Image (tube, coloured by chain):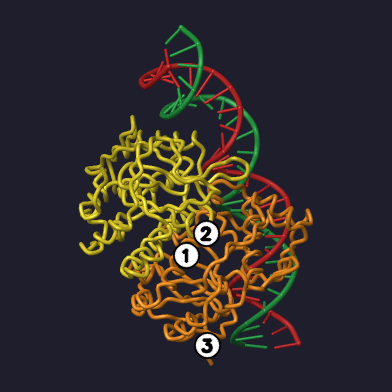
Chain colours: A orange, B yellow, C green, D red
Amino acid sequence: MSVICEACPLRDKPVFTEMSDSEARFMREFKSGEMRVSPGSVVLMQGSASPQLYTVLSGMGLRHQTLENGRKQVINFLLPGDFLGLQASLMGESSHTVEAVTEMVLCCFQRNRLEKLIAQHPSRAYDLIWVSATDEHFLGETIATLGQRTAQERVAWGLVRLYQRLEAVDLAGDGRAAMPIRQQDLADALGLSLVHTNKTLANLRQRQVVTWRDGQLLIHDLPELARIGLTDLEPLPRRPLI
Amino acid sequence: MSVICEACPLRDKPVFTEMSDSEARFMREFKSGEMRVSPGSVVLMQGSASPQLYTVLSGMGLRHQTLENGRKQVINFLLPGDFLGLQASLMGESSHTVEAVTEMVLCCFQRNRLEKLIAQHPSRAYDLIWVSATDEHFLGETIATLGQRTAQERVAWGLVRLYQRLEAVDLAGDGRAAMPIRQQDLADALGLSLVHTNKTLANLRQRQVVTWRDGQLLIHDLPELARIGLTDLEPLPRRPLI
DNA sequence: CGTCTCGTTGACATAATTCAACATTTGTGG
DNA sequence: CCACAAATGTTGAATTATGTCAACGAGACG
């Protein structure tokens, strides 16, 4: 049974800007269905086109890119509320692969209805642009991280940001969050080797800043973690939900 | 004297998708003026809001972000045809600084006319989304570079991409391009130290792959440079001009 | 002429990677 | 129920890529 957009559980989260009832009703027409994928399965493949756009309804995933020599870079993690597929739709082929980490439920839209949506509901077009701008903001911050932060700073930064994002969709709170990813995934996201990531985590654990075991992240000292990660704790920018 | 959009010299470059006369006429109304800035001046400041959107008409600039400890990361270089200011406009404040490298001429738009533009000319809204998607594509590739490529690969990759982008707007050709940036800027873009960037360039020069002196980039062996940079030489994706 | 900025090079320091081994858990087939 | 393989996490030791420090040259400019 599909979720009706008007009753979308994500709609009420405070990170998302308000969506009017009329917009929600409109999105229901735009929505073409739902997709449920199991852990490890590929939603979108690097190099191939896709006629679909998606919004993550639940579960966690990751976008990654593989270089010619086989090395892998995780571009970012996908959480509920994230919108994906624009690149693959507009530019003909996807530059990255999207993979489910946990079981995920995705809200599906048809690419060919996009033009109609933009024409008929300008406020939604505006929101799409807004979401893209927000995404670019985060990608830019990631670039700054990979380019300028040390391993410790990267790990701390990565954990803070992940925690904030999870918290924003009520998947974390009180310094506690479910972290279904592997250390290898975090390493690939931060441009570090698995071994060094592990040692850095061990160090943070020993200093009683964070503990990450059995898929559970426990942040004992969030301000300290943020300080180490050279990042502030400002709330995430609000963005529209697509 | 301002350029009339219908006669915009960028419009005919093959990297840009075609803009109909009616769209160009519409953009002329949207355009609020031009801005000429001298080398080194700041167009957009990290942390401050801006009511303006810009398209680069000529000249070169760079976007960079400064971390709390003072280290600087160049997010990307700005060339003619690049659109900027969405973040600063939509999200309240800019996450990065935009700085002119050479003298630049920017085409200016008012943020508050954006909604009207989207509502009245859906095809332009579609284009805005397209441009955002293309930008995200490049930022993702940059993330993969900083995370996974070695210093040699980064430098080679950076030079290939810059050359391709310059060529796309007729600022380069035959393996020759004007490169007004400093080695320090390239280093900051690639997340490398100045010294190491310099030594890597010296190595590429000695191997007769590229020469970069006095603001002139000479690529003697483009396929080899691309091979070193682990990148293909596919033409850049076409994108709309805003 | 002195003072900048920018590029260049050598010597040294260090952060991070690679290699290797082992522990734990989980699932699987005999 | 056990044996075994496949993932994942953990740790130590050796290696290497890259950063830091320092000095110098060339050109631009007042």
Q: Are marks 2 and 3 in contact (CB under 8 Å)?
A: no
Q: Is residue A14 left or right of residue A113?
A: right
Q: Are marks 1 and 2 on the same chain?
A: no
Which residue position holds label 2?
A: B91
State which quadrant residue A163 falls in. Answer: bottom right
Q: Measuring 34% from the left and 31% from the top, which residue is drawn there?
A: B213
- Asked if B16 appears above or below B98 in the picture, the reply is below
Q: Is residue A43 left or right of residue A213?
A: left
- Say whether residue A161 is visible: yes
**Which disc number belongs to residue A130?**
1
| Nearest the eye: A76 or A101 | A76
Residue A124: percent from left, percent from top: 44, 73
Q: CA distance from mark 1 to mark 2?
A: 8 Å
* Circle 3 Cα neighbour tier, 10 Å, few/some/many (<14 / 14–19 / ≥20): some
> Amino acid type of disc 2?
Met
Q: CA distance from mark 2 to mark 3?
A: 29 Å
Q: Is residue C29 left or right of residue B194?
A: right
Q: Who comes first in sequence, dot 1 or dot 3?
A: 3
Q: Is residue B234 left or right of residue A231?
A: left
Q: CA distance from mark 1 to mark 3?
A: 23 Å
**Which disc number belongs to residue A4?**
3
Q: Are marks 1 and 2 in contact (CB under 8 Å)?
A: yes
> Amino acid type of disc 3?
Ile
Q: Measuring 42% from the left and 52% from the top, which residue is drawn there?
A: B52
